[in-house]
Image (cartoon, rainbow, N blue to C red):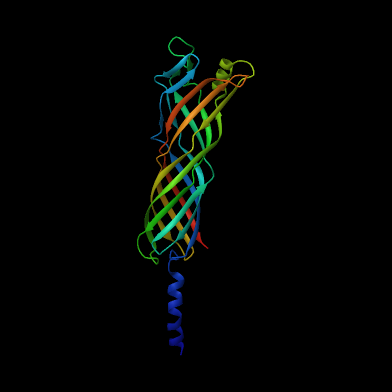
Amino acid sequence: MKKIAYLALIPGVICGSASAQSAGSLISSVGGTWLDFGQSSSTALQSTSAAGTFNSPGTGGQIHNTFTAELALTYFITDNLAVDLASGVPPKLSLFAQGTAAPLGPGGPTLGLGNLQPLATTRSWPPILFLKYYFGGAQSKLRPFVGAGVNYTWFSHTELNSNFSGALQQFAGPGSKVTASLSSSWNPAFNAGVSYNITRNWYATASVTYLPLKTNATVNAIAGNGQTVLTNRTHITANPWITFVGIGYRF
């Protein structure tokens, strides 16, 4: 009888130790994210006013790398196919620029951008919805995965270097104000990583995501009467590589 009882327990032990990354599983993961903007760049500053439209050759900028926290929710449709929503704390991005701005063209006033560091900061909101394929069976300890998805990015709390905004206000005259904005956009996203089953409900996970992100930056100097007297534009290519390392729990 004892042998029969022990044999009856074996299936339960096996199931208890098996991975829970199977159809119907919902896993929440938290961790740290490193955003590498090594490929970021921007076009030359273009300025438009009553004097005309002029480019400032040699101007440009890059976004500096940064760190933030991420939360991801993963739902397994089948044992191998899952949908994943990645979001988290909106990272604060800093744009560092170089070159000399000549908003009124050759012979007009100039402003060196290299000494205004950072030139601007902003908060980025870039949630990504992935469709992922997990290799191996639901019982596998180590499961590599690949994914593709869609991202919608918008920005808030965009602030300019005080010396930069001060120069624009001086140009626009008494009672003027300066506004700065970054355009929102839809973007594809590509992901690859690995999940490791620590226990039946706990997982370690790591992944790398490539996000071909672009945005248009616009800075307006608005006179006291509400008229825009100077508009500055640049096209920013961000294209971050996003590295995530975290731990997940199955609910």
Residue farthest toward the left in the current orientation of the protein: 136
Q: How many marks?
A: 0
* Residue at the spot 43% in from the left edge and 30% down from the top edge: 235
The location of residue 99, given as percent across then percent down, is 43, 20
Left or right, 32 with respect to 208, comes to right
Q: Is residue 84 above or below residue 229?
A: below
Give the image quarter of residue 137. bottom left
The location of residue 209, given as percent across then percent down, is 40, 46
* Residue at the spot 45% in from the left edge and 83% down from the top edge: 8
Q: Is residue 182 above or below residue 21?
A: above
The location of residue 140, given as percent across then percent down, is 38, 64
Given residues 179 and 160, the one toward you in this image is 179
Q: Is residue 21 above or below residue 194?
A: below
The location of residue 241, given as percent across then percent down, is 40, 42
Given residues 100 and 244, the one toward you in this image is 100
Residue farthest toward the right in the current orientation of the protein: 175
Whether residue 118 appears in this view of the structure is: no
Given residues 68 and 42, the one toward you in this image is 42
Give the image quarter of residue 134. bottom left
Residue farthest toward the top in the current orientation of the protein: 107
* Residue at the spot 45% in from the left edge and 27% down from the top edge: 234
Given residues 158 and 65, the one toward you in this image is 158
Whether residue 203 appears in this view of the structure is: yes
Q: Is residue 221 above or below residue 241?
A: above
